[in-house]
Amino acid sequence: MTKARNIAKARADERVPRNPGSEQDASLSSTLIRGIEILQCFSSGDRALGNAEISRRLGLNRPTVSRLCKTLVHLGYLRRDAKGAFRLAPKLLALNYPVLSAMPWRHEVLGPMRELAELCAGNASVGVMSGDSFVHVQTAGSPPGWPHIPDIGQTGPLHRSALGWSLLSLLHGREFADKLAELRALHAEEFAAFADATAAAVERCRKQGFCVSYGDWRPNLVAAGAPLGRTEDGLCVAIACAVPRYRAVASYFETDLGPRLAEAADAIRLSGVFALPAPAD
Amino acid sequence: MTKARNIAKARADERVPRNPGSEQDASLSSTLIRGIEILQCFSSGDRALGNAEISRRLGLNRPTVSRLCKTLVHLGYLRRDAKGAFRLAPKLLALNYPVLSAMPWRHEVLGPMRELAELCAGNASVGVMSGDSFVHVQTAGSPPGWPHIPDIGQTGPLHRSALGWSLLSLLHGREFADKLAELRALHAEEFAAFADATAAAVERCRKQGFCVSYGDWRPNLVAAGAPLGRTEDGLCVAIACAVPRYRAVASYFETDLGPRLAEAADAIRLSGVFALPAPAD
DNA sequence: TATATCGTTTGAAATAATGAAATCTGATGT
DNA sequence: ACATCAGATTTCATTATTTCAAACGATATA
């Protein structure tokens, strides 16, 4: 085989455009970002990823990915399966232990959550605000045949979900405005489409203590959400119940489950862990 | 090292505090390691850490830590509290959603775990092997007043705990020998002190399906453990029950709870998720 | 007000990461 | 069986990225 052919091939194959749009702050560590982006790759549902696949997704070349993966394996956060592909290792959970143990209230809300899940024959979850998303920190009662696997760490959009709206209702004044601006910046057209629904749901949370979403996040789920409050260390926390659409009756959510969820939230607040912020002008 | 060499060195490289002791493989990415080590700092129980404190612990200088932390904040895994100190952010949980959702059996074992926890008036937990440690992936029933907070992601030693011994009993032949060697290398004298207890417990797990630990891990906890098996993707999984020492009766663990735990493990194995490896030679 | 301590910024030095090419492996296909 | 392909890793020259010291600003303490 001639050299020329090799070179031509290499050029055709994988000339990665130097990430032109998103120039990144030079005061950030790009190596650290890339390494962590490798871990994030697994959030897309793939349990095992090869070197080449990762390098394709991240726009890095194979040697770089190989080195970073080697490092992550060395640290124990990545492991190799029988086929040589990379998988997330259980040690990642250890990294999170401090996050979870800083939320001892996760255990206290489990009782009420189970009751709610049973009540609505669906699923209950508690989430906290994180950037433009919510993150589940506790779930209860996912019946078999549930369309997805609700579990700790699952994320969803703040601007089109019952849990998200409930969380937004905990922000006021400048903080609230800033968060909306952040969402607008990140989700331009989509945010616009949900702006009215968001405003209405937030308002309802503040007045009635709950809101309802009809398939705004997961098309086949209807959900009710209620704000719990902010913890001592500033986290916004809310609770939600979800039911498969085919089994959900709107009036039930509006006049029965919703108010009950709000009551449950009130009851939970009696523990004193969560504080509803006073609506600052 | 001789004085002469010190001086010579000092002259040669005017300023070289060249990472003493742990020289690391040059084929690993040191920047990535350092960045993740910052996240690991929080595993030591501190919820909030300042820039200076981190740089002290890691032996890096402040500007470097500042930059890395800035990057981690940018990525959303670190947040700043009211006082300007860093805390782990909930987004970290999102990173291991894939880890948890790859273990759907976590939910199936929850029922039996609750029963066991109630039965022994203590705590039940399921853990997987990870390096020289186990990692809790599910916990049930920590009564109020429990000495520590068992939660997902908590880690403990493989060589001196009921859960750890149960996990070790799932390895055979070369794999088993390698793991013991790894433990010996990492915990020299401590491993030696527990070598006999470990061997006995592993043997008991293989023969009777359970083992008992009297305060080997947490001095004030007595625990029984039982191997569950290996999952399809190669993880070793075991279950354990723990009771505060002052409330634990040895005979109960040996003749009652232990066997029951082994039975529960048998029942769980009926699901087909966990396979007990055939003792290779 | 003076004095620490902490966090960030800057700029220069050089370390450490990058990517092309080569090597090696295992899989697939003819 | 052989050829071909795709993936993973190693090597090495290049250079982009990190690092560290010093200085700065801010905040807290005496």
Image (tube, coloured by chain):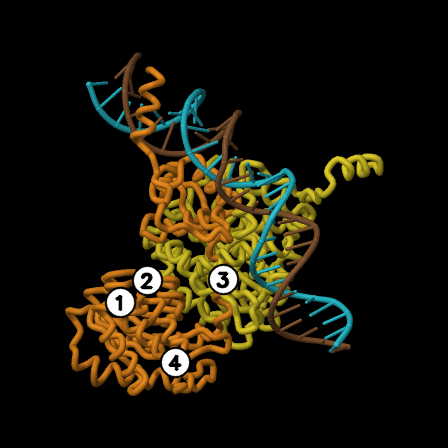
Chain colours: A orange, B yellow, C cyan, D brown
Mark 2 and mark 3: Cα distance apart in space: 20 Å
Front of the two marks 1 and 3: 1
- Subunit that carries the residue with mark 1: A
Left of A84 or right of it: where is B281?
right
Total labels: the figure holds: 4
- Provide the secondary structure element on which disc 3 rests: strand
Front of the two marks 4 and 3: 4
Left of A25 or right of it: where is B34?
right
- Can I make out residue B14 in this image? yes
Residue B232 in percent (x, y) is at 36, 46
Left of A102 or right of it: where is A180?
left
CB atoms of marks 1 and 2 within 8 Å: yes
Tags 1 and 3 both on a single chain: no
Mark 4 and mark 3: Cα distance apart in space: 23 Å
Say which residue appears at 47% left-offset and 77% top-offset.
Answer: A231
Name the residue tied to disc 3.
B78
- Subunit that carries the residue with mark 2: A
Placement of B220 over or under D14, stated as above or below: below
Query: Which amino acid, by three-letter code, is at mark 1?
Result: Phe
Mark 1 and mark 3: Cα distance apart in space: 26 Å
- Provide the secondary structure element on which disc 2 rests: helix
Name the residue tied to disc 2.
A186
Tags 1 and 2 both on a single chain: yes
Mark 2 and mark 4: Cα distance apart in space: 20 Å
Query: Which amino acid, by three-letter code, is at mark 4?
Result: His
- Counting residues from the start of the chain, the first of labels 1 and 2 encountered is 2
Query: Which amino acid, by three-letter code, is at mark 2?
Result: Leu
Name the residue tied to disc 1.
A191
Name the residue tied to disc 4.
A172
CB atoms of marks 2 and 3 within 8 Å: no
- Subunit that carries the residue with mark 3: B
